[in-house]
Amino acid sequence: MERLTPYVDLLFKLQYPLPTPEQPDSFPDSNYYSTGILDVFAIAAYIAVMAILRDVLRLWVFEPFARWKLMRDLNAKALARASKQADFTANGHTNGKANGHDNGHANGHANGYANGHTNGYTNGHANGHTNGHTNGHANEHTNGHANEPTNGYANGHTNGYANGHANGHANGHANGHSNGHANGIANGNSGNAAKKSPRSPKPTRKELKQVHRSVLRFAEQGWFATYYTFSWCYGLVRRLLVSIAMEANMSDIQYVHVNLPTELLDPKAVWIGYPHIALAGPLKFYYLIQTASYLHQIFILNAEARRKDHWQMMTHHVITVALLFTSYFTNFTRVGCLILLLMDWCDIFLPLAKMMRYINIKQIYTDATFGFFMVSWLISRHCLFIVVVHSTITQKYLPLMLDRERGYYLSRPAHAAFSAMLVALEILQAIWFWMICRVAWRVVMGVGATDERSDEEVDDNDSEGQSKEN
């Protein structure tokens, strides 16, 4: 273990310690450090730690939660579908039997009486006349012709009506029940056949595939939301609380920004006192971990499926990493901390809005979060960021010169390079803000916030949406 200690210290211990300045304007009780090439090893170690933390949170926190939520909703949907099927089936049998008996008896009696009377009269007259003539002729000589019509017709009508009603009712019930059962079973079977038409209540393959994709996307955005919440709080709240604990005078707290004497609307303090060679331990750690974060995101961009604005995102991250490295090694860390703070704020809310959408939170909450993100973006990345860019371009606090021995690196080429990279970032952010406005218009029109950056495999129905990931 003793042999490994120097290597562990190289990876996880801040290098290049310095004595604490006599009158520091921030972190008076912290250890101070300078910058050097060995800090690259710390950046590499932080990237590895981030990769591990990202996978742990993804596999053990975000994916299980998203899968539980989406499967619960999907099962509820399947149960509702099954309940609808049960109602459909019950209606099929009920209607079938009801129609069977009603139609059967109605048809039976109608057909029965019709057949009965028809057959009765037919048989009556036929039998009557036959019996009449027979009996008439038989009694003719005995009783005379006068009895012929009477007996003949009397017997004929009597036998006829009797036979008619008997045959009629018999035929009626027989036909009625026959028709009734036939119609009833036919209608009942129609209901049975109809119940097979709805889909199976089990989740479909397409639904399960969509759940899997949403789970993965939720976990990805969960990491970004977690990291940017940490980085923004570490960049502002922690330093503010430290200052409050150390200072009893509220006037000292009012100027605290990232625990440095900077002001958002007048960033002259980031230039005054340059070069800022001695870095407080928390500030150095903050700068290195932010650099590691953007490098880590470059790796993620190339490892994941290409999004619609892949090259825009790649350009953004490359420029940001270039600014972080150059500002770190040329002692412009104060302006760098101010820019990072502005960038991180709105990056908390975009992943949150996406996470809500991926797990089917009510659209009103997704839209509200997206609306807050939009306002935050406008203020932090355009209004306040442009103030910093303007202060950099119209540099009036420092002379443009190069003095490596003093750690002074603000030459004209360096100033032009810094200004160009900041302007390039603002142009990219303006393009993204236009896309954000398009999403906002969709929200106003009732369509809801969607993610335009998502690849077609994940969001088949999306045609527009947020483009900014970070």
Image: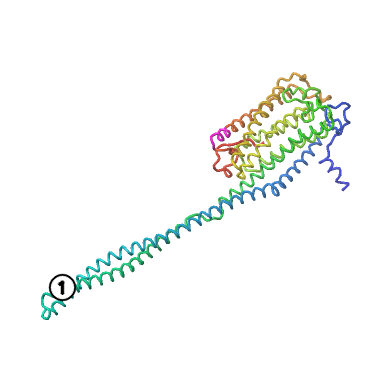
Q: Is residue 439 magenta?
A: yes
- The residue to which callout 1 is attached is 150
Residue 212 versus residue 260 in the image, above or below: below
Circle 1 SS class? helix
Magenta part mainly helix, strand or loop? Answer: helix
The image quadrant that residue 222 belongs to is: top right
In which quarter of the view is residue 226 placed?
Answer: top right
Magenta stretch bounds = 438-446
Q: Which residue occupies the foreground of this view, 15 or 397?
A: 397
Image vertical order of residue 411 relative to residue 290, above or below:
above
Q: In this rendering, would 290 be left or right of 165? A: right
Pinpoint residue 417: horizontal percent, then vertical percent: 71, 25
Question: Does the stretch in magenta take in 354?
Answer: no
User: Viewer-proximal residue, 65 or 438?
Assistant: 65
Query: Which residue type does callout 1 highlight?
Result: Thr
Disc 1 packing (10 Å; few <14; some 14–19; many ≥20): few
Residue 119 vs residue 96, the one in the foreground: 119
Name the residue at 57% across, 44% down.
457
Where is residue 234 shown, x and y percent of the image?
Answer: 76, 36
Q: Quadrant of residue 265?
A: top right
Residue 219 lies, with reference to residue 388, above or below; the image says below
Q: Which quadrant does the C terminus fall into?
A: top right
Left or right? Give the position of 224 relative to 31.
left
In the rendered structure, the answer to whether residue 367 lies left or right of residue 246 reads left
In this orientation, which residue lies closer to the viewer: 355 or 362?
Answer: 362
Image coords of residue 174 (percent x, y): 33, 69
According to the image, what is the colour scheme of the structure? rainbow
Whole-percent x and y of residue 407?
82, 26
